[in-house]
Amino acid sequence: QVQLVESGGGLVQAGGSLRLTCVASGSGFSLNAMGWYRQAPGKQRELVATITRGGSTNYADSVKGRFTISGDNAKNTVYLQMDSLKPEDTAVYYCSAKNFLNYWGQGTQVTVSS
């Protein structure tokens, strides 16, 4: 079993920055990829960015050029640096991790005020 714990959410003004962190823990596990998804009120959960164990990244078009995902395999940790934040980035951000199963964190709220 893998547990994911997110941190770093909060309230920020438009144009500001936040950095999210997700730490995976458990025993005897190995992950193939980690990533971030988000869900705004009344909307479906959507992909934000993912990173594989080998370092390949994938971003939603809406965040390209503004968000950067990175990871530390030794620490089983993934980061999401969010710059030039917009009000439409307001959502609960969920960490995800994958091996032969998919795992989810509890989510962290990001609110961007205009």
Image (tube, rainbow, N blue to C red):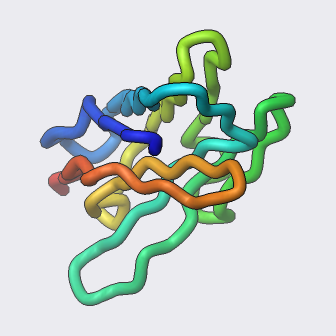
Q: Quadrant of residue 94?
A: bottom left
Residue at image location 16% in from the left, 53% down from the top: 113
Q: Quadrant of residue 71?
A: top right
Q: Who is closer to the viewer here, 14 or 74?
A: 74
Q: Quadrant of the C terminus?
A: bottom left
Image spot of residue 78 (x, y percent): 53, 29
Residue at image location 33% in from the left, 31% down from the top: 18
Residue that sits furthest to the top in the current view: 74
Number of numbered markers? 0
Residue at image location 63% in from the left, 51% down from the top: 98
Image spot of residue 95 (x, y percent): 43, 48
Residue that sits furthest to the front in the current view: 28
* Residue 74 drawn above or below residue 94: above
* Residue 114 drawn above or below residue 72: below
Asked if residue 6 lies left or right of residue 72, the reply is left
Q: Quadrant of residue 93?
A: bottom left
Residue at image location 44% in from the left, 30% down from the top: 26
* Residue 71 drawn above or below residue 87: above
Image spot of residue 89 (x, y percent): 36, 59
